[in-house]
Image (tube, grey):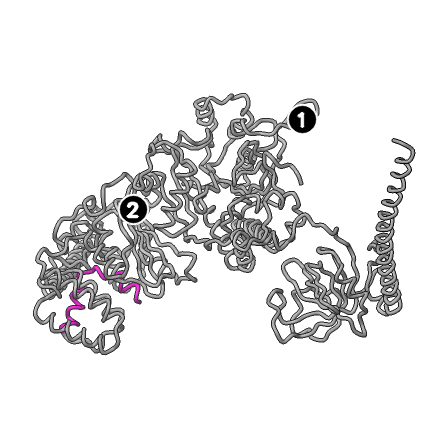
Amino acid sequence: MTLEEAQGATEEEQQAQSKKGLKKQQKEAEKAAKKAEKQAKLAADQQSTEEDDFAKDRYGVPAMVQSQQKLDRVLVRIQDFTPEKADQLIWLRARVHTSRAKGKQCFLVLRQQQFNVQALVAVGDRASKQMVKFAANITKESIVDVEAFVRKVEQKIESCSQQDVELHIERIFVISQAEARLPLQLEDAVRPDGEGEEEGRATVNQDTKLDNRVIDLRTTTSQAIFRLQSGVCMLFRDTLTKKGFVEIQTPKIISAASEGGANVFTVSYFKTSAYLAQSPQLYKQMCICADFDKVFCVGPVFRAEDSNTHRHLTEFVGLDIEMAFSYHYHEVIDSITDTMVQIFKGLRDNFQTEIQMVNKQFPSEPFKFLEPTLRLEYTEGLAMLHEAGVEMGDEDDLSTPNEKLLGRLVKEKYDTDFYVLDKYPLAVRPFYTMPDPNNPKYSNSYDMFMRGEEILSGAQRVHDAQLLTDRAIHHQIDLEKIKSYIDSFRYGAPPHGGGGIGLERVCMLYLGLHNIRQTSMFPRDPKRLTP
Amino acid sequence: MPMYQVKPVCGSHMKTDLPTCMYKLPNVHAQQGDSSTAEHALQNGDVDPAVKALEARQDEIMRKLYDLKAAVEGLAKTVTTPDADLDLTVSSSLSSQSPTSTSTTFKGVTDLDKLLGKDLGALRDIVINANPAHPPLTLLVLHSVLCQRYRVLSTVHVHSSAASVPPQLLSCLGPRHADSYARQMFQLGFTLIWKDVPKLQMKFSVQNMCPVEGEANVARFLFKLLSPYPSDPAVATLVDSWVDMAFFQLAEGSAKERAAVLRALNAALGRSPWLAGPEFSLADIACYCCVLQGGPASSTPSNVQSWIKSCDNLGHFSPAKLFLK
């Protein structure tokens, strides 16, 4: 370029620059002006807030509770908030379920387990604007201590469990703050699947729920399920104790796999390895041979089955029963079925609130049963299946679809969700099952079904060492591995029988749920080891 | 009776020194072996065997007299009860149930396989759902008759929907059969479930039959297992109409309806010994149970009362009467 052109260019540039520069400067000036405005406003606000915050000591985040002092304060439970408590000043500790600001008021819903109540902070002579703002900004699921007046309301608050009262907050302190972003929202976790699809609202995936079990267990449905499960365990213990059973605890680290050996977990045991017990079978029987007569045991059971189904876990709680009988193994069946019926009755009579709560999210038919329990023979079951068109041999085992079909047929004819199928073919049962005395094709064994799914497998056990050895040889089992088992029957063993149920499966089937992970607090399956 | 005893004046074993210089004569008072025991005064309370024999004969005669009396009473009942060949109340109390006793009352041959479908090697179970507030007496009666005819496995269950059920309802089908652990050994199953149902219901073969509703219809089904309906359609219709009248008007009707039915019963029983002609039928069972359920028979007409007595004599209705007590 020539010098003149260059000069001309720079002049133009300068001119352009100055135009651009002007524009830029203008923009910057605008920005600065806006910023100054904002800052002035903030400053003004802050000044006003700082000026007017007369309620500063009535809210806030106090120091972490490290047991600094022992307060004599009585905290009232939300379920006790009824119109009788109107106009009382009380303290409570609860979680913030929701908080919503509306102008000069902030509505909070405070929750304790399945109960919740509406609470209100309003700008007035007790609460300042800053306090209301603070309340509105408390993150969900934080734990707060609240002092409030209980006030009656004229219109029922439909969305809360305590519908007749609300709290007018005097003081509110955050004891434990929850993070702002929660991995899942409780309302979504409780929403029934159908409703979620219809209204386009979110429901929570089961895996998400299981990964964040701590939050998922806070929902009303989960609380109800696990309270019911606790009830099942309690009824099981109480019923059996009344019948004269003794509770035992059996070892879970064992030296040899009892039932075949395919599905056991191995653990390293000092210089050798050991196995985790598949079932307390062996030890229950040894207790009977040790004259305990009637025993039961509640404990974990470990099955290394690589089944990813709706009803299999690798670790579950087993409720096992074993008893000596006088002349016929039906005495054992009667005892077990009576225990189950007492459990069902106890749940039906004492846990209706929990059952209804679960039904809100997972609707199902109430559980029906007969007393005394219906007992059908395997041949009858086969006849019913044949009638329905299923091709099955006399000595075949029932497949899962056939079990479900049979369950439906029995439900149609007898209207019961719980029944016993007796006299299974010998070929499909383990080697320690006592054969039928009159017909060698069959055995003295039985299965119990709830809603068409098997919950218990039991039998009269072989209590004679010689017969046991013969049966083991017939099943091609290495006698060396079960030597200690056979030895327990050499010193006088009474005729006995029993069976075991899975706690999670019984709960799942009683409530009509569809996945066993819903009834296991921290489930273990081939793909899940945490939490 | 022994006479009062006097102590012997002198001991019986007094030793006497007999003089040896006199000649001896045999002792007049000595015991003489066998012949004279009867003449001795009996001092030990022994009973004369002849008296024993006499007493035995008397007992025998009394026993025969009692037997004769019972037989005559039985005959008297049979004579007044039309159509019964033997007095079942006596026979049932004396000996165990024999299958032939009912074949005299229910004539006609029935084949379970034809009625209930092929025997698939498993127990054929009839399930009846009844409301404990309205126990079905007719079915209890038919059940006891069925038990006499076939090997029936009877069980009673209480459904979870029913509130507590009084114990007499739990034992209404009689004591548990000794072989009840082996279901295959029975020809027929009779399962009674006390349940909160609006109407009595029976289920048998879920695939082939819809449930049968109403006590009248279930009674007809069960009766056909015992003997076929009369082949004459007029008689069959008569039986059916009496059954329906029993269940709709006697059991569930107002007092006026009941009175009307009782009058009709009276008229019919004046003409024939049983309601449907010369033979005992389902109509009699149904009407008897419904009349009985209505309460004590103070105002029932005379024919009806004698008919009730005849029904009693037949002995089938004892479960119903036991139940109502």
**Which is the main secondary structure of the residues drawn in magenta?**
helix
In the image, residue B318 lies in the stretch drawn in magenta? yes
Query: Which label is found at residue A268?
Result: 1
Tell which of A406 and A31 is nearer to you: A31
Q: What is the spatial separation of the Cα atoms under label 2 and label 1, in whole angstroms?
A: 56 Å
Q: Is residue B120 left or right of residue A278?
A: left
Q: Quadrant of the N terminus of chain B?
A: bottom left
Q: Identify residue for label 2.
A: B207
Q: Chain of mark 1?
A: A
Disc 2, SS: loop
Tell which of A416 and A58 is nearer to you: A58
User: Is A102 situated above or below B31?
Assistant: below
Q: Chain of mark 2?
A: B
**Residue B257 pos. (x, y %):** 22, 75
**Residue A41 pos. (x, y %):** 85, 63
Residue type, mark 1 in image: Ser
Residue at image position (18%, 74%) is B262
**How busy is the neighbourhood of tag 1: few (under 14 within 10 Å), some, or many (20 plus)?**
few
User: Is B44 situated above or below A206?
Assistant: below
- Disc number lying in front (2 or 1): 2
Magenta residues (range): B303-325
Q: Is residue B269 left or right of residue A86?
A: left
Residue at image position (28%, 50%) is B204
Residue at image position (7%, 70%) is B271
**Residue A397 pos. (x, y %):** 40, 33
**Residue A285 in view of the camera:** yes
